[in-house]
Image: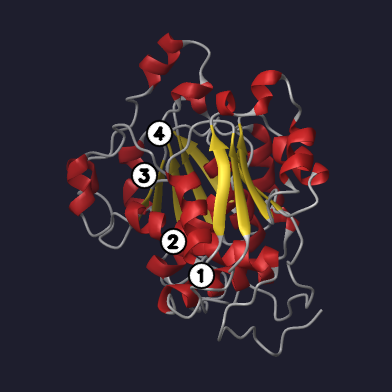
Amino acid sequence: MSEQFDRHSGEVPSTDSVFPNHVSSRSLQGRSLVTLDDISLPQIKDLLDRAAYIDSHRREVAHTCDGRVLATLFYEPSTRTRLSFETAMLRLGGQVIGFAGAQLASVSKGESISDTLKTVSNYADIVAMRHPKEGAALVASRAASVPVINAGDGGHMHPTQTLTDLATIRARKGRLTNLTIGMCGDLTFGRTVHSLISTLCRLGQVDFVLISPDELKTPEYILERIDASPTCTYRETSDLGEVIGDLDILYMTRVQKERFFNEDDYLRLRDTYILDEEKLKAARPDMAILHPLPRVNEITAGVDQDPRAAYFEQVRNGMLVRMALESALLGDELPGYQVRKEVQA
């Protein structure tokens, strides 16, 4: 597939051509975000546009959420995601409460997620929650009386990371379709991969190259999601070097020790794929390298200086999209930002 031409029409697609002409006029205010399937494609685009606006209007938006309180309820360890959510609210003028680690919460005393969320809803205006169990974010959203943002639930979904990834891909490639995207590493437990594939399938016109050992292959329900898209395809391989030259985007992931019950299996698989300067010699000069971080050793430090490395840009974009999302769910308008007038229900 050429990276310059639409494989069906032969024309170069515009950046926004994948999105419908109309977006619901209903605001995201008051809603929770458990998965990006909860919102429309035009609403996703609007969040990406808001994030780009915030990036160039930092001072103007600095008081958007004055008086608001974000609660970060992180039942498993996190550095980037939790700090990104908290920094986003602080940069919007709000404040933050919360905990990091189940041992610091009343869950250690046996309290249910529902009771925790009903309680925290009295303290905060919005909640960001990470939990090791799939479905926990949905339970939380149903119990809370304020918006809940899924900051990752087990190996299921990670919608704000997907927004981050989309913002980075769009910034690097100028589009979100007509791309060959390689997903490499832990494709079984990688919720960032599952979430990104699911959303890209809604956009269409993406060829996925799924690179993993047999023990960490993509779950069947994700493959079915690709199959259900009339314009998306996939192929599976265990050889990164064989396919790296075909890719517009290489999305690296770490083998997650916390998802393994058997440490021997983890130790055997953790070094399966290591991206280094030698492997990059076979890649396209404009390929972008993404990684949700943290990395262990799957990308060597020498790659950081390569202009194709985009993973630290993802960190910045993550803060921006979370600023956009938090303000949108709270219904706090960004000063000077104008939603396109032609959009309607």
Q: Is residue 14 left or right of residue 296?
A: right
Q: Is residue 246 something that shows in the picture?
A: yes
Q: Quadrant of the C terminus?
A: bottom right
Give the x, y percent position of residue 262: 49, 10
User: What's the residue type where badge 4 is placed?
Assistant: Arg
Mark 2, Cα crowd under 10 Å, few <14 / some 14-19 / many 20+, is many
Q: Earlier in the sequence, mark 4 or mark 2?
A: 4
* For discs 3 and 4, the disc positioned in front in the rendered view: 4
* For discs 1 and 4, the disc positioned in front in the rendered view: 1
Do the CB atoms of the residues marked 1 and 3 lie less than 8 Å apart? no
Q: Earlier in the sequence, mark 1 or mark 4?
A: 1
Residue position for label 2: 317
Give the x, y percent position of residue 141: 77, 46
Separation (CA) of disc 3 from disc 4: 19 Å
Q: Earlier in the sequence, mark 1 or mark 3?
A: 1
Residue position for label 3: 243
Disc 1 is placed on an element classified as: helix
Separation (CA) of disc 3 from disc 2: 28 Å
* For discs 1 and 3, the disc positioned in front in the rendered view: 1
Residue position for label 4: 254
Is residue 166 or residue 14 the one in the foreground? 166
Disc 2 is placed on an element classified as: helix
* For discs 3 and 2, the disc positioned in front in the rendered view: 2
Do the CB atoms of the residues marked 1 and 2 lie less than 8 Å apart? yes
* For discs 4 and 2, the disc positioned in front in the rendered view: 2
> Which residue: 80% across, 51% down?
145
Mark 1, Cα crowd under 10 Å, few <14 / some 14-19 / many 20+, is many
